[in-house]
Amino acid sequence: SESGCLSIVVLGASGDLAKKKTFPALFHLFQQGFLQSEEVHIFGYARSNLSDDGLRERIRGYLKGSDEHLSQFLQLIKYVSGSYDSGEGFELLNKAISEYETSKNNESGSYRRLFYLALPPSVYPSVCKMIRSYCMNPSSHAGWTRVIVEKPFGKDLDSAEELSAELGKLFEEEQLYRIDHYLGKELVQNLLVLRFANRLFLPLWNRDNIANVQIVFKEDFGTEGRGGYFDQYGIIRDIIQNHLLQVFCLVAMEKPVSLKPEHIRDEKVKVLQSVEPIKHEEVVIGQYDGYKDDPTVPDDSNTPTYASVVLRVHNERWEGVPFILKAGKALNSRKAEIRVQFKDAPGDIFRCKKQGRNEFVIRLQPSEAMYMKLTVKKPGLEMATEQSELDLSYGMRYQDVKIPEAYERLILDTIRGDQQHFVRRDELRAAWEIFTPLLHDIDAGKLKSVPYQPGTRGPQEADDMSRRMGYVQTHGYIWVPPTLA
Ligand code: BG6
């Protein structure tokens, strides 16, 4: 049901995620008219002793918009304080929600309660129990109760399964929305269309034509301020096992039967289940110099801030094609992209091999773009070849479109009850199955993080490995995102 009272509850309202992502996303939805003042109310819940205005002041600085919009939006927010494991706070919360619900003239509509857990996962089970015991949409009401949870969903297969089982006792799978915000990014959502709506790609997308695929995440800053959290997890749990693996699924999976969320997620699970065990010699992990200067990071930490991991898919389409998933902090640039590198043209008469291969690059961020590296005749009187590109840069092509933020799209999906871009329980399990043996070996010190200098490409060993995997870098070719003059 898409109408009626909507109560959005942000748990962990005074935390970082809520301030930086959740409230700004809600504000964007409000600005665009997706959250109507007449039917929406927002509740912040946390332990700190704050007034409504206290919370409003805290988040105001993170919201960009006209003063009028801003004050209208902030007026929708109420604050309730309480602990995460005792009934009292949640009784208060329920009372606040119910009061608001009865204050509304809501004859035709239903009642919708959306809980957003912007919290550390250690409190998920207790908070979910509290919601279940005190705050559910009463069964006498039409409507729903839905819960959004954020990674980390456990630290390995067993802990993730335990968490899933606990939450599974409290909520139906249809009520649980496991967010992976990469699934809300425009060019990630575009992958399905690109692959399955273009005749051009269909016959090429396989081991006969593709030499290797890279899925790359780079950040040009370190773990400043989050060292304590990060050191418990490391880059594989923070980025690769979730964000990059989701992208991998969309690049590698077979065509779904239809666009129904279950059909799409079925295919994702299948391709995950086809991934072979990761071999140590196909992994490079690194840690940047200076990481351990953070007082919250132990001096002997082996936690990787960089990792390059090769996945191999054991099926008819991909046998023999390495998928290199690479992520790092404190590198030389900030970007996320997919690189699909094609094999050399056989029987080359131009001797253009040295200029590089066809490569299809999907730039997820920043400056969303897709470009295809091609060999063309160098314009001019001579018969020479050079690398050029077919380029679709979103900023140029879609000048009037504002690309939505991942979180705002995903929150809207939750309100609409569309689980396509959320991680299903069996999908999460399959993802952990792939990485758990490697993670345990790293935790046990069987693989050592090699040091790298901040501001560089990361460990040399990773580039060497990519080369070994058959990746051919085009020297001297640099794609610069075109900008409006
Ligand atoms: C988060 C990670 O999930 O994603 C962070 O915990 C990382 O470490 C962030 O910085 C990156 O998200 P984005 O959207 O900026 O690429």
Image (cartoon, helix red, strand yellow):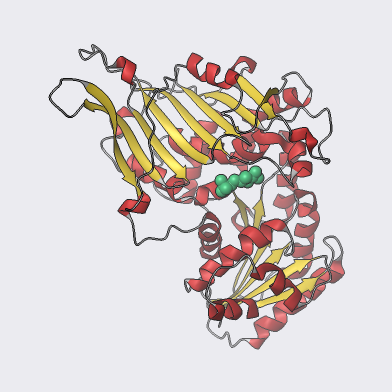
Residue 235 picture location, percent across and down: 66, 35
Does residue 424 appear in this view?
no
* Residue 256 showing in the rendered view: yes
> Within the image, what quadrant is residue 95 found in?
bottom right
**Where 216 falls versus 193 (above or below)?**
above
State which quadrant residue 310 falls in. Answer: top right
The spot of residue 460 in percent (x, y) is: 58, 20
> Image check: 178 left or right of 49?
left
Q: Which residue is pictured at 61% across the width and 21% down the height? A: 283
Depth check: give the residue in front, 342 or 294: 294
Q: Nearer the viewer, residue 46 or 301?
A: 301
Identified at 52% across, 67% down, the residue is 28
**Drawn side of residue 45 relative to residue 176, left or right:** right
Indicate whether 318 appears above or below 468.
below
User: Looking at the image, which is closer to me, 80 or 173?
Assistant: 80
Instruction: Describe residue 199's horizontal placement relative to residue 356 as left or right.
Output: left
Query: Residue 209 appears at what percent x and percent y?
Result: 33, 22
Q: Nearer the viewer, residue 264 or 299?
A: 299
- Disc count in the image? 0
Percent from the top left, x then y, of residue 121? 75, 49
